[in-house]
Image (spheres, rainbow, N blue to C red):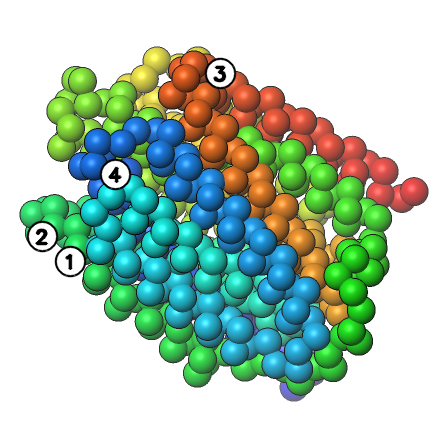
Amino acid sequence: MSRGSAKPAAWLNRTVLGIGLASLFSDWSHEIATTLMPAFLATMGVAAAWLGLIEGISDGLSSFAKMASGFYTDRLRQRKPIAVAGYLVTAAGTAAFGLATSPWHVLLARAFAWFGRGVRTPVRKALLAGSVTKETYGRAFGFERMMDTLGAIVGPATAFFLLAALNQHYPTLFALTLVPGLAAVALIAFVVKEKDRTPVSHISFGESLRALPIRFREFLVAVGLFGAGDFAHTMLILFATEKLTPSLGAAKAVSIATGLYVVHNILYASFSMFAGWLADRFNKGRLLAAGYFVAALMALAIILLPTTVWTLTLVFIIGGIYVAVEETLEDSFCAELVTEEQHGMAFGTLATVNGVGDFVSSLVVGLLWSAAGIALAFGYSAVLFTIGGIMVFRLTATRAR
C-alpha cells in the first residue's frame, strides 16, 4: 500500500478509538452526576455560592494533580497504568455522590472524582498525541472531544429519563454511574496500546518548566486569563432553573434546564470534530482566538437579552460551540508548540493553568452572582474572555519573530 493511500485513515487507529470510547463512557458517567448536582444540592437548601465552591475546589485539586501527573509520567516507560488508575478513581468518586447527605459530602466526592480526572488527563493526551502524526493532531483531538461530548449528551439525557423513572431517588441514580464509568476503565486497560518510548532523563520540576518554549509559556498566560472567567457550565443549568421556576414551576424548570444542557452538549460534540478538521488546515491560534470571542458573546447574551426559553436556548448553543473550539484548539495547539518528549509536561501544565482558572472562575462567578447579581458576575467573565482572545490573536500575529 502506498503512503498516499494509507494517509487518510492513519490517524483513526486502535489507540485513538479506544481513548475516544473511554472518554465517551467516562463522560456519560460523571455527566449524569454533574447534571443532577444543582438539583441535588437544591434539596439540601444550598445556593449558587455552594455550587461555585464545590466546582472551584474540585477543579483546583484536579489542576495540581494534572501538573504532577504530567511531570511524573514523562519519566515513565509506560504511562498507561496511571491512566487506568485515574479513570477508576473518577468512577468511584462519581458514584459516591449517592452517599451524600450534606453539601460537604458532595464536595468530598466531587473532589475525589476530579483528582482522578486530573491524574489521567495529561496521560490520556500524551497517549493520544503519541499515537498520531503532527499533521493529524487536530483530527485526533477533535475526535476525542467529540466522543467525550457524546458522553456528555447521553449523560444528561440518561439523567433526564431516570430522574422520573426512579422518582428522584438520587442514591440509586448516582450508583448507576458505575456502569459506564467502569466500562471506560476497561477500554483504557484493554484496548489502548502504548507505543514504546524512552523515558525523559530525570531533571527537576523547575528545569522541566524552564525547558518549555517561550511561545508556549506566552500561550499559557492567555489561556490562564481566559480560564479565570470560564465558569463551569453547571452555572448555566442553575441560571436557567432559577429564571424559569417563577413562571413554570420548579419541576418543569429543572426539566427544561436539563434539556438545554443536552442541546449545549450536542453542539459541543458537533463542533469538536469540525474544529479539529479546521485546526489541521488553518491557523490554530486565530481559530482559538475566535472561540474566545464567541465565549464573550455568550456572557453578554446572558446579561443583555431578556430571559426566555428561546434566549436561554441561544445561550446554551453558543456555550456549546465555544467550548468545542476552545478545548480542541487548546490541545492541538499545545501539542504543536512543544516537542513530543515534552508532551506530558506541556499537557500537565496546560491542564493545571486551566484548572486554576476553573477554580478562580467558578468561585468568583458564584460569589459575584450571590452578592451582586448576574450582570457583574457574567460581565467579569466577558471581560476576561475578550482579553484572552486578544492575547492569543496577538501571539499568532507575532509568530514569525
Give the numbered dot on residue 186. none
According to the picture, the residue beneath numbered tag 3 turns out to be 376
x and y percentages locating residue 393 in the rendered image:
73, 34
Work out whether mark 4 precedes mark 3 in sequence or the reverse, and give the earlier one: 4
* Pick the front one: 131 or 220: 220
Work out whether mark 1 precedes mark 2 in sequence or the reverse, and give the earlier one: 2
Work out whether mark 1 precedes mark 3 in sequence or the reverse, and give the earlier one: 1
Residue type at tag 4? Leu
Work out whether mark 2 precedes mark 3 in sequence or the reverse, and give the earlier one: 2
x and y percentages locating residue 56 in the rendered image:
47, 40
Name the quadrant of the N terminus. Answer: bottom right
Give the numbered dot on residue 41. 4
Give the numbered dot on residue 166. 2
How packed mark 1 is, by other alpha carbons closer than 10 Å (few <14, some 14-19, many 20 or more), is some
Between circles 4 and 1, the one closer to the viewer is 4
Residue type at tag 2? Leu
x and y percentages locating residue 358 in the rendered image:
52, 40
Real-space CA distance between mark 2 and mark 3, rounded to the nearest whole angstrom: 39 Å
According to the picture, the residue beneath numbered tag 1 turns out to be 172
Real-space CA distance between mark 1 and mark 3, rounded to the nearest whole angstrom: 38 Å
Real-space CA distance between mark 1 and mark 2, rounded to the nearest whole angstrom: 8 Å
In the rendered image, the residue lying farthest to the right is 401
Please say whether residue 23 is visible from this viewpoint: yes
How packed mark 3 is, by other alpha carbons closer than 10 Å (few <14, some 14-19, many 20 or more), is some
Work out whether mark 4 precedes mark 2 in sequence or the reverse, and give the earlier one: 4
x and y percentages locating residue 335 in the rendered image:
69, 59
Q: Residue at x 63, y 57 (%)?
A: 67
